[in-house]
Image (spheres, rainbow, N blue to C red):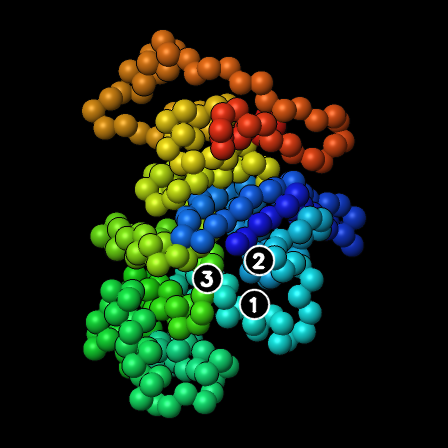
Amino acid sequence: MLELSHVHKVYRVGAFGAGTMRAVRDVSLVVRPGEVVSLIGESGSGKSTLGKMVLGLTKPTQGTITFEGNDVTRLRGFGAKKEYYRHVQGVFQDPFSSFNPIFKADRVFEMIRTSYFPAISDAAWRAKVLDVVGTVRLDPDNVLNKYPHQLSGGQLQRLLIARALLLDIRLLVADEIISMLDASTRIDVLNLLADLKERGLGILFVTHDLSLGNYVSDRSVILRKGAIAEMGPTRRVFENPLHPYSRHLLSCVPQLHRTWAEVDAELAANPPEDVELPTVAEGDDSAPLVEAEEGHFVGIDQR
């Protein structure tokens, strides 16, 4: 469904754009229907930049992004982009900034109606809205006709997902959508994503939290300095991390009922198998992957 092939993103920085900063380096990945793919990485790893390029909010410097066989980077004109957004939508980290505080929150639904369903009757539209609000596990009486300040972050985030579901959406880019929510609300949104996956929706889930990626995704992509460090089925990546960076990240996760000394001693007693990582020549901006086991890839080791 969605395929990124050798995607790079380089920004001009400094006075008069004299310098450059590479945000994404030679990334290739696929998101299939009914699959959750997590982009996992620390701040500055390039994960949000990838999400923005998929949504057409910024263009890749090099490489291609295709959705159902169409090159997203070559979309021209209002009509072509509008049709693309009928099928691909994004939900972002801060739900509060997505709403105008002087308007009622469900105004975002009316904006969709005006743009995509101008001929629909009031009764049919209300039935459609009630259906998607129920799909995201909200009570219409509690959220419709309310101002943003009257709703919680979790309710607003789910309203944004409902807004996307009003369209013929096939791919959702979820960029840190639960990082600003409290713990009791996070699980509801994660379970909602699982429900949407069962409906055949492809989801690109952007997160810095290893535990969230492990919980929700079918495949995980660990990014470092804009390049893929490790990629594969989530269970394999987390149970058998092969890249030194992946091992380091997972070793930093606190474990209940075990001290750091016990964890370090176990790692020393059971070192992971050595994997020969791909290498590139000085000045080469490619980031090749090696298939260490079926479907499980490791990338270059950037120091």
Q: Secondary structure at mark 1?
A: helix
Q: Pinpoint residue 215: horizontal percent, then vertical percent.
A: 32, 42
Q: Pinpoint residue 189: horizontal percent, then vertical percent.
A: 30, 56
Badge 3 or badge 2: first in the primary sequence: 2
- Kind of residue indicated by mark 2: Phe
Please say if 4 is above or below 158: above
Badge 3 or badge 1: first in the primary sequence: 1
The residue that mark 2 highlights is 67
Residue 261's image quarter? top left
- Kind of residue indicated by mark 3: Arg
The residue that mark 1 highlights is 84
- Kind of residue indicated by mark 1: Tyr
65 or 57: nearer the eye?
65
The residue under the point 49% across, 29% down is: 294
Labelled pair 3, 2 in contact (Cβ < 8 Å): no
Label 3 vs label 2: CA separation? 10 Å
Q: Pinpoint residue 286: horizontal percent, then vertical percent.
A: 69, 35
Residue 123's image quarter? bottom left
Instruction: Check disc 2: other Cα within 10 Å, few if <14, some if 14-19, many if 20+.
Output: some
Label 3 vs label 1: CA separation? 10 Å
The residue under the point 58% across, 18% down is: 276
The residue that mark 3 highlights is 170
Q: Secondary structure at mark 3?
A: loop
Please say if 265 is above or below 142: above
Q: Secondary structure at mark 2?
A: strand
Badge 2 or badge 1: first in the primary sequence: 2
Labelled pair 2, 1 in contact (Cβ < 8 Å): yes
- Can the viewer see residue 202 in this picture? yes
Please say if 119 is above or below 223: below
